[in-house]
Image (tube, rainbow, N blue to C red):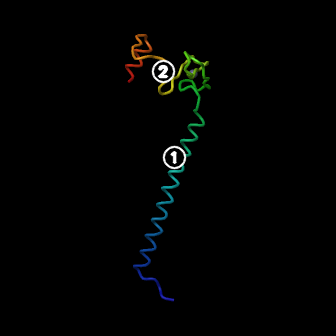
Amino acid sequence: MQRPSAHEIEYFHRMETEKLKEARQKHAQEMAQKEKEDMKALHYMHCPKCGMPLEEIDFRSVYVDKCFHCGGLWLDEGELEKLTGEDDDSILGRISRILK
Ligand SMILES: [Zn+2]
């Protein structure tokens, strides 16, 4: 059998290196995704301040997340707007317009 030329050896070596690089990138992506899922599982519906479980409460017909441990009240995106109107001059209305 003919021995592979230096050119062929280099070609196969490059192919192997590419494959390894792709496998490493895929592994890194999978790890990043898993890390995200683990973080979400660990923190979902937990108070960002004290870490205790949050409970959904009906506040003016908007379901907001309340921590009964530290008393924090957490709003999801769009919930502050739901609680206030454009011409709402209450403190919530003013905060809502500042944050826009
Ligand atoms: Zn809390």
Occupied quadrant, residue 53: top right
Q: Quadrant of ligand 1?
A: top right
Write down the residue under mark 2. Answer: 82
Write down the residue under mark 1. Answer: 32
Q: Closer to the camera: disc 2 or disc 1?
A: 2
Q: Is 24 above or below relative to 86?
A: below
For the residue with label 1, is its CB less than 8 Å from the closest atom of ligand 1? no
| Residue found farthest to the top | 90
Tell me which amino acid carries mark 2.
Lys
Occupied quadrant, residue 97: top left
In-image side of 93 versus 43 (left or right): left
In-image side of 54 versus 76 (left or right): right
Q: Residue at point 50% right, 51% down?
A: 29
Q: Residue at point 60% right, 23% down?
A: 56
Q: Is 92 above or below relative to 31?
A: above
In-image side of 17 versus 53 (left or right): left
Q: Residue at point 51% right, 46% down?
A: 32
Question: Counting residues from the N terminus, which is met first, the one under dot 2 or under dot 1?
Answer: 1
Q: CA distance from mark 2 to mark 1?
A: 34 Å
